[in-house]
Image (cartoon, helix red, strand yellow):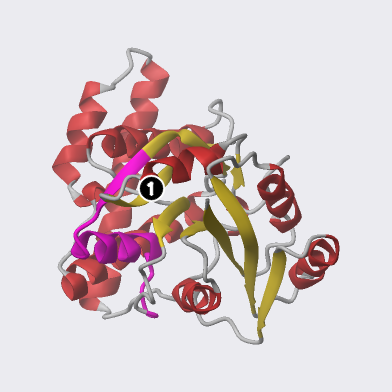
Amino acid sequence: MQTLSIGICAYNERENIGQLIRELLKQRMEIVLLKQIIVVASGCTDGTEDIVKEFAKGDKRVMLIKESERGGKSRAVNTFLKKTQADIIVLISADTLPQKNAIEELVKPLLNKKIGMTGGHPVPINSRNTFMGFLAHFMWDLHHEIALKEPKLGEMVAFKNIVRKIPSNSAVDEASIEAIIRTSGLSIEYCPKALVNNKGPETLSDFLKQRRRIYAGHLWLKETSHYSVSTMSGLKILGLVLENLKNSPCELFYTIIAVNLEMLSRFLGFWDYKVLKTNPAKWEIASSTKHLTP
């Protein structure tokens, strides 16, 4: 049986880290053996480390790696990669919660020797009854539709242990791993049944902050690694939006605003990277995405 190591990169994740570890330990795994859950806590000041230490006392598979300073997520990913020796690696965002059997569904395709990486299906917990809730579901529903046709992986990914390190200045760590896996000759696969809950931004400022950072990171990846994720194509996204337009006047109005906000985010990301020459590898946290419920 192949072994599995789960990595969590955390910066002030007290609100969710305990729930996340608890859910990971409850996952039913029959095709892999969970060897370790490693939390890389970088510059935490909110008690995140203490919560992880309590879990480590009760389960030797849980391990804390403490970094005194925050150097960005990709550096924390590299710290994790140096430590693990498992056959299969899972990286899961610290502000998410996997649903039942999500890890098993995620790693199952990796038993195929031609597949090197998989990604889960993020589902926001936000209510659709508010504009910001609609916006969160709108973005992740589009991600889902695109990933079904051409995989784009994020929030929770698994890959064979062939990635030694990723660029430490990457602001899009999962996409950087995608590029390495594809370069190695292996394929990637989207796993729609591997459900993982996250939370979309509750404020417009957090939405713009998050989306512009991601787009700037993808521009950097395209320029430095000559790799583009499937969601980079604006025309592809617009086509899906038009295909899935609802007749409801309210949803139509919300959709028009959502498209314009995404366009604005991409312009800001372009401005950040191409004009200001900045690469947000150590980004400002969108705080309204951090408070998940069990």
In the displayed structure, would residue 114 be above or below residue 142? below
For disc 1, the marked residue is 110
Left or right for 53, reference 287: right
Residue at horizontal 32 percent and vertical 67 percent from the top: 217
Residue that sits furthest to the front in the current view:
1
Please say whether residue 268 is visible from this viewpoint.
no
Left or right for 100, reference 191: right
Query: Residue 214 location, x and y as percent?
Result: 36, 60
Quadrant position of the C terminus in the picture: top right
| Residue toward you, 172 or 248 | 172
Q: What amino acid is found at the position of numbered circle 1 in the picture?
A: Leu
Query: Residue 278 location, x and y as percent?
Result: 32, 79
Instruction: Give residue 218's quadrant in the image.
Output: bottom left
- Figure label count: 1
Q: Secondary structure at mark 1?
A: helix
Magenta-colored stretch includes residue 244: no
Magenta-colored stretch includes residue 179: yes
Segment colored magenta: 168-190
Residue at horizontal 54 percent and vertical 44 percent from the top: 103
In the displayed structure, would residue 141 be above or below residue 233? above
Query: Residue 54 location, x and y as percent?
Result: 84, 65
Instruction: Give residue 66's quadrant in the image.
Output: bottom right
Residue at horizontal 36 percent and vertical 35 percent from the top: 144
Query: Residue 69 location, x and y as percent?
Result: 61, 86
In the displayed structure, would residue 219 be above or below residue 159? below
Please say whether residue 74 is visible from this viewpoint.
yes
